[in-house]
Image (cartoon, rainbow, N blue to C red):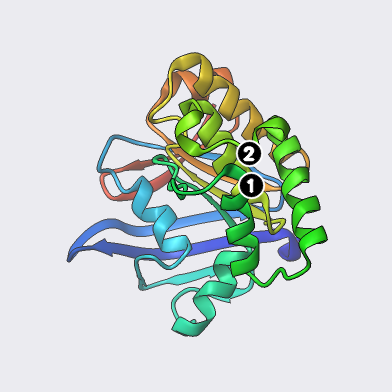
Amino acid sequence: MEEDILLKLENVDICRDENRVLHDASLTLRDGEFVYVIGKVGSGKSSLLKSLYREIPIQGGEARVMGYDLRKMKRRDIPYLRRKLGIVFQDFQLLIDRSVSKNLEFVLRATGWKKTGEINARIDEVLRQVGMRDKGYKMPHELSGGEQQRVVIARALLNNPRLILADEPTGNLDPETSGQIVQLLHDICRQGTAVIMTTHNYTIVRNYPARVVKCENACLSDVKE
């Protein structure tokens, strides 16, 4: 059914600093689907995700995300697209001068939330969802890497996105913590949020199976079982 398609790329080129990192790439993602994007470092995985939230431009072909035409959309519409996405960064990008709760409050107020009671309730809800309900008062430097990444996932969930883009979310974590973070993303997906996760950790892909798309030789292709 067409209405459950969240993302559709058809024959697109993605360039970064004049270099074409993906050529004639196509990808379709449906509601509630989990997809790994695998490939070597420098193969275009991160560039693919950045193109989906309009950090870098898409050239050629057709590119739509949740009703937005990525090739034709105006700059002023980009923040509205990003509010419908949850973005999980490898390097966390938490504000180090404020607590976990204040980090999340900052995002909510920046995206239009005004009532303090609703803000506090939403913060409590997402922290509970990622197993960090009792850590809202902590500063980022007081948390382990895995805990910081849980906060980043909570931040991505704040505005109830239909799609989470997770760029190497386990890249800075040990194997056990990595497994916990990927399990959390799979749990979130089972609750109805689609996830695209880039990784070059094939152990994770084996241990937590889902659809796999490979970036290789500037091309995107589904990996068959």
Residue drawn at point x = 34 percent, y = 54 percent? 47
Q: Within 10 angstroms of label 1, few (less than 14), some, or many (20 or more) residues?
A: many
Q: What SS does tag 1 mark?
A: helix
Residue 214 higher or lower than 178, as above or below: below
Percent x, y of residue 21: 26, 55
Quarter of the figure that contains the C terminus: top right
Which SS class for mark 2? Answer: loop
Residue at image point 47% right, 72% down = 62
Q: In the depicted view, which residue is nearer to us: 119 or 156?
A: 119
Q: Mark 2 points at which residue?
A: 137
Q: Which residue is more in the foreground, 97 or 156?
A: 97
Residue 54 higher or lower than 32, as above or below: below
Query: Residue at horizontal 52%, vertical 20%?
Result: 177
- Image vertical order of residue 46 relative to residue 61, above or below: above
> For mark 1, what is the residue?
101
- The residue drawn where x is 49% and y is 29% is 142
Q: How far apart are marks 2 and 1 (CA)?
A: 6 Å
Q: What residue type is labelled 2?
A: Tyr
Crowding near the residue tagged with mark 2, few <14, some 14–19, many ≥20 C-alpha atoms within 10 Å:
few
**Mark 2 and mark 1 residues within 8 Å of each other at the beta carbon:** yes
Between disc 2 and disc 1, whose residue precedes?
1
Left or right: 65, with 71 as reference point:
right
Q: Which residue lies furthest to the left in this view?
A: 18
**Residue 127 drawn at (x, y percent):** 70, 39
115 left or right, relative to 50: right
